[in-house]
Amino acid sequence: MQGLKILDLSDNLIESLPNSISKLKTLTALMLRFCTKLEKVPSFSEFQALKMLDLRRTNIKDIPHGIEKLVNLKYLDLSGTSITEMTDGILGKLTSLQHLETTTYFRKGDILVRGEELGGLSKLEFFKGRFYYLKELNRYAQAVHARRRGPRQYRIDVGNQPEEEYDLCSDSEQYIELRGCCICTDGVKIMSDVKDLIIVNCMIVDLCEEEAFFSRFIIPVPHNFFSSLSRIEIFHSKSTKKLFLSNGVLGNLQNLKFLYVVGCEEIEEIIASESELEEEGASSFKFTLPKLCWLELCNLPALKSICGANGVVICDSIVQIDIINCPELKRIPLNLPLQDDGQPSPPPCLETICISSEPEEWWQLVEWDHPSAKSLLEPYILKW
């Protein structure tokens, strides 16, 4: 046993590990996942050869003693434990760490992790966990950008836990979710490679009239590009009338595939004009979202415009459009590609336009840029 390197006790009903296990100084992997009754473990200070420690779904309540001495540890899974806080200074000593999971599950508080300390783990390739406060996300993003390298995969939740257990975009490799956050004037710093951004029940504080919702989202590098974003979902967020500014963030969303805006009662414009030329000019302004395949606008009672009076959205990859309970929206600025004979045609990938069944006259009153648009798109309509 003295030369033992791998010890896998997963899925057992053990309640504690004996102190004698500390004599196994050659261990490189200790796996205790799904030992749901396990509460006590001895000091890990002698396990300095350990590279993998898996405590997933155990009932351990405190960070094991001596874990800061595991300088060779590459894999640490604390998800689903009863641990609530990572003691200050411990993460910074695990300099070999490549894989870290600290997310717990429904009805358990996630492990409190410090953003700046996590950002100092230069070898980290995978992280799944939660910051309770936006300032910790900002510190983490700043640290990652300062050394120009972060994890290749991450799932970062910020703020409140959901009221029920669920997992949006579980296959996403770069995912950030904000829930119940107050977004102040110092904004939200995010990583430049984020692909999925989910925003739930958040409030913008002290937003100026000329500012848009996404004016508060910052990538702390030159040009502030959001070129990796593939999915944006915004649910029940408050205190904002504009989502994007036409000359700002929108021009960087060339990889955006999914845009969902749901239950934001004060939103009036999705893409807001930034110049008088756009607002008053006779010619149309075209906004190209080449990869957008799904647009959902739902329960937006104040929404008046998707992209201003003169704007047109070119999204030839669009598959589905959902416009549900947006009674003030009078114009759908969808570009219709022209055929060889100069006549318009539906976007080539379009399958469904889902609209509210009430009020019934809404669809009849919607304005289009081309007189044939309504008849061309009628076969795609699904009333909800």
Image (cartoon, helix red, strand yellow):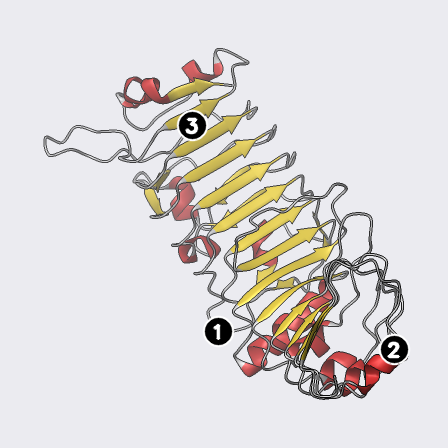
- First along the sequence among labels 3 and 1: 1
Q: Of the residues tagged 3 and 2, which is closer to the observer?
A: 2
Vertical placement of residue 26 versus 118, above or below? below
Mark 3 and mark 2 in contact? Answer it, CB < 8 Å: no
Q: Between residue 123 and residue 253, name the one nearer to us.
A: 123
What is the number of the mark on residue 331? 3
Instruction: Work out which residue is located at the far left of the displayed protein and give it.
Output: 341
Front residue (pair 317, 360) = 317
Between marks 2 and 1 in the image, the one whose residue lies nearer the viewer: 2
Residue linked to disc 2: 42
- Whether residue 54 is visible: no
Alpha carbon separation for disc pair 3 and 1: 36 Å
Residue 10 visible to an observer of this rendering: yes
Q: Secondary structure at mark 1?
A: loop
**Separation of residues labelled 2 and 1 (CA atoms):** 49 Å
**x%, y% of residue 160?**
77, 51
Q: Earlier in the sequence, mark 2 or mark 1?
A: 2
Looking at the image, is mark 3 or mark 2 earlier in the sequence?
2
Q: What residue sits 40% from the left and 54% below the top?
A: 255
Left or right of 353? Residue 51 is right
Q: Amino acid at mark 1?
A: Pro
Q: Check residue 278 in the rendering and tell me which mark sits there, or answer none.
A: none
Give the x, y percent position of residue 281.
35, 42
Q: Residues within 10 Å of mark 3 (few under 14, many from 20)?
A: some
* Residue 99 x/y as whole percent: 62, 72
**Which secondary structure, mark 2?**
loop
Q: In terms of image quadrants, where is residue 317?
A: top left
Please determine whether, in this image, residue 311 is positioned above or below residue 299.
below
Q: Which residue is mark 1?
A: 222
